């Protein structure tokens, strides 16, 4: 699902919990957060709402509130980077 990052630029890195990170990208048509975790990371629930969608590395949808595992998760929206930052920092 790396195609989500096409035509976007890296904006910043957020630390969401111990060993849990969000790499934020912003583009003309969408904003993306790539969630990544270190081995033995803190528990982190994957946030979503009606405007922000989550999928795994293969594009499969992830249920809101699912616990982040050891694989990359993509969050994306067309509502802007602020929408993703807001939901991640709740």
Image (cartoon, rainbow, N blue to C red):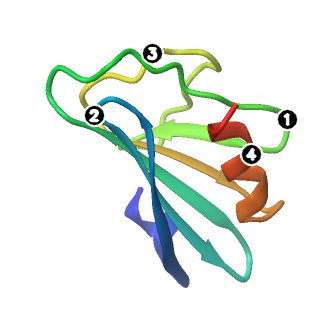
Instruction: Report if the CB atoms under discs 2 and 4 are less than 8 Å apart.
Output: no
Residue at mark 3: 67
Q: Which picture quadrant has residue 44?
A: top left
Q: Residue at x 79, y 62 (%)?
A: 78
Q: Which picture quadrant has residue 52?
A: top right
Quadrant of the image containing the N terminus: bottom left
The answer for how far apart the CA atoms under marks 3 and 2 are is 14 Å
Label 4: how many residues lie within 10 Å, few (<14), some (14-19) or many (20+)? few
The answer for how far apart the CA atoms under marks 1 and 3 are is 19 Å
Label 2: how many residues lie within 10 Å, few (<14), some (14-19) or many (20+)? some
Q: Earlier in the sequence, mark 3 or mark 4?
A: 3
Looking at the image, is mark 3 or mark 2 nearer the viewer?
A: 2
Residue 89 percent location from the top left of the image = 65, 38
Q: Residue at x 52, y 15 (%)?
A: 66
Label 3: how many residues lie within 10 Å, few (<14), some (14-19) or many (20+)? few
Q: Residue at x 20, y 35 (%)?
A: 38
Looking at the image, is mark 1 or mark 3 nearer the viewer?
A: 3
Secondary element type, mark 1: loop
Residue at mark 1: 50
């Amino acid at each position: 699902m790396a195609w989500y990052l096409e035509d976007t630029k890296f904006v910043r890195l957020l630390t969401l919990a111990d060993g849990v990170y969000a790499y934020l990208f912003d583009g003309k048509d969408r904003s993306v957060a790539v969630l990544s975790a270190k081995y033995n990371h803190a528990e982190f629930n994957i946030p979503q709402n009606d405007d922000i969608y989550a999928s795994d590395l293969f594009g499969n949808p992830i249920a809101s509130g699912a616990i982040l595992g050891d694989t990359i998760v993509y969050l994306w929206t067309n509502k802007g980077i602020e929408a993703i930052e807001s939901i991640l920092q709740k």
